[in-house]
Amino acid sequence: MNCVQVVRKDFDSVLKAMFRVRGETNRILIGDALARHYYHDHGLGTEFEMAMGAIRHCLKIRNQYAHFEWWNDNSGRLALADLVDIANQNAFIKDLASLPTFYVDVALLNDQEQYFVYTDKTLAWVNYERRYRAGDIKTNSVPKPTQLLQPALHLPGPLN
């Protein structure tokens, strides 16, 4: 929202447009539609689109933990299963052990957290850089972060 409201110069309308709708995906789509051309007009189209892609990947990571069932199966990793996907199928499911299971470990969780930090820094940089290029501020005090590759959602698998 902040990247959008600084280019639209209308905090109230941007806030209301983005938060009167439900769901993060809808908010991302609205923010993208409201701001994209402002960033392209100042030579930041690629960077803005990369930031939007990073946000979308963070949402996938977030949704995995919010909408999947997770448990300790004593493997030393966190077990995950997509219950929404399973519930929409007609197969008989008798217990957690019979679900298609994915895993994450501490190293992957750390990589995912670092990607969230990278995304936050990227959004801040593109926000300030566009304002700098538009002449709204005298300098961009936010350093451009080094690009990170998107981390996996889970370890390769399913493992059962």
Image: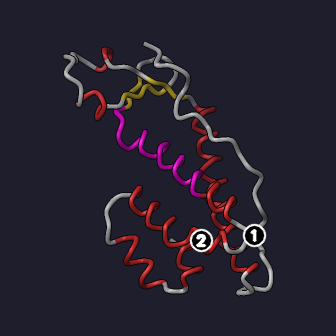
Question: What's the magenta region?
Answer: 52-69
| Residue 93 is covered by the magenta coloring | no
Q: In the displayed structure, does residue 18 sit left or right of residue 140?
A: left
Question: Quick one: label 1 or label 2, which is nearer the N terminus?
Answer: 2
Quadrant of res 145: bottom right
Where residue 144 appears, as percent x and y from the top left, is: 77, 62
**Residue 55 is covered by the magenta coloring:** yes
Front residue of 43 and 69 = 43
Which numbered marker is on residue 142? Answer: 1
Sort mark 2 into few (<14), some (14-19) or many (20+) by Cα contacts within 10 Å: some
Instruction: Indicate the secondary structure of the residue bearing disc 1.
Output: loop
Q: Residues within 10 Å of mark 1 (few under 14, many from 20)?
A: some
The residue under label 2 is: 37
Q: Nearer the viewer, residue 128 or 53?
A: 53
Vertical arrangement, residue 32 with respect to residue 128, above or below: above
* Main SS class of the magenta portion in the image: helix
Amino acid type of disc 1? Val
Q: Does dot 2 land on a helix, a strand or a loop?
A: helix
Q: Position of residue 111 (x, y in %)?
A: 64, 39
Is the C terminus in the top left, top right, bottom left or bottom right quadrant?
top left
The tally of labels here is 2
Residue at coordinates 51% horizontally, 50% vertically from top-left? Answer: 56
Q: Is residue 80 left or right of residue 44?
A: left
Residue drawn at x 57%, y 37% as measured from the top left: 109
Quadrant housing residue 7: bottom right
Label 1, label 2: how far apart the Cα atoms are = 22 Å
Q: Is residue 109 depicted above or below 157 in this figure?
A: below
